[in-house]
Amino acid sequence: MPDDSLADFVRRLPKAELHLHIEGTLEPELMFALARRNGLSTPYPTVEALRAAYAFSRLQDFLDIYYQGAAVLLTRADFHDLAIAYFRRLAADGGVHAEIFFDPQTHTYRGVPMAEAVEGLLSAMDEAKATLGVTSGLILSFLRHLDEADAFATLEQARPWLSRLTGVGLDSSELGHPPAKFARVLAAARDLGLKVMVHAGEEGPPAYVWEAVDLIAVDRIDHGNRALEDPALVRRLVADGTTLTVCPLSNLKLCVVPDLAAHPLKRMLDLGLAVTVNSDDPAYFGGYLLENYVQTAQALDLTRGEIARLARNSFSGSFLPDADKARWLAAVDAAAGELT
Ligand code: ADE
Ligand code: ZN
């Protein structure tokens, strides 16, 4: 049974979302509307048939459908409409800040100019701030199944918008594509003043997380679940205070965990890791930020104090200026204090 008081508690806690692929917020209804607007066909005849295809047994099953779905995004209006719909949902969940990934190569490969994606997303980010009070950052994520030269070319194409980018990331098919493959382009991005993060330890082994830490010197790790297999790695992540952006419903849908009760989030908290809760690709995984908090809290029997800690970690691990972090941390404490 849904626990309304738990949902109310979570909704009233200010929260930041740090691991969200904007292309992964493309709801089937919007996918069909954009296909119509752009005169494109869809790979499935109906919304219901499309949703029925969202049964994944590994990351690659999902990625194949996710890249196919993104093909309806052509114009800056499309990217704007996609992003503003996400920000509205985030605000309804009590989210106040988001650092969102976009995958430019998914679009430039189809002949969509980078400007269409970036300008559309930036306009939605500006609108979200003005109309919802939601702040945000934009993270350019390289596709790791492509090669290093392609990533360098993508970074070059992004030059006109460098001042509006928060950082760079690394996503797509993890196994066989370790962070080391992109060490030079990620270092080049850092030299341009960008934050650096990589997906590691979602399906890939602890060795990929070690590379992220030692070789890339990441500012954050996306997922990081498999770090738990290596106690020395856990000690290192705790000592460094590295934020892990964990995505419970994503892990469930992609069979990284067999059920939410087996999710390592509570263990991660107990070990002293700086974990956060995020939705990853909510249109595909069955829940936005609030659902991720609520379902995980229920499955793992998290205390209100632990839930508030997750919200605190979301601001500590963000790339917000220190003054904003301090303000939001105080707001989390105030909200948690009033609600418990
Ligand atoms: N791209 C979008 N979602 C992703 C995920 N969970 N892992 C890797 N690449 C992704
Ligand atoms: Zn992700």
Image (tube, rainbow, N blue to C red):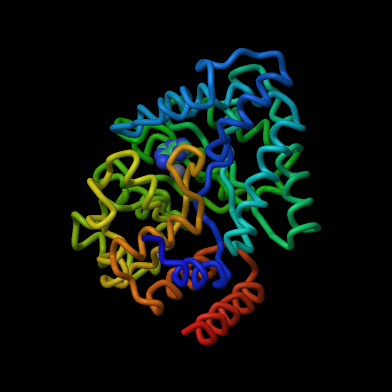
| Residue 15 visible within the image | yes
Res 172 quadrant in image: top left
Which of the 4 quarters of the picture holds residue 261?
Answer: bottom left
Q: Nearer the viewer, residue 106 or 306?
A: 306
Please name the residue shown 50% across and 17% down the image.
Answer: 44
Q: Which of the two residues, 279 or 213, is positioned nearer the viewer here?
A: 279
- Name the residue located 36 percent from the left edge and 27 percent from the top edge: 61
Q: Is residue 224 above or below residue 301?
A: above
Q: Is residue 72 left or right of residue 225?
A: right
Residue at point 51% right, 21% down?
68
Q: Is residue 73 above or below residue 233?
A: above
The extreme front residue here reads 1
Residue 178, position as x, y percentages in the image: 34, 37
Q: Nearer the viewer, residue 210 or 290?
A: 290
Give the number of marks. Answer: 0
- Assign ligand 2 to one image quadrant: top left
Out of 68 and 116, give the one closest to the viewer: 68
Q: Where is 46 relative to 138, above or below? A: above
Residue 59, position in %: x, y? Answer: 35, 34
The answer to whether residue 115 shows anywhere in this view is no
**Left or right, residue 295 beside residue 301:** right
Q: Quadrant of the N terminus?
A: bottom left
Q: Is 242 on the left or on the right of 186, as rendered? A: left
Q: Position of residue 79 (x, y in %)?
A: 69, 35
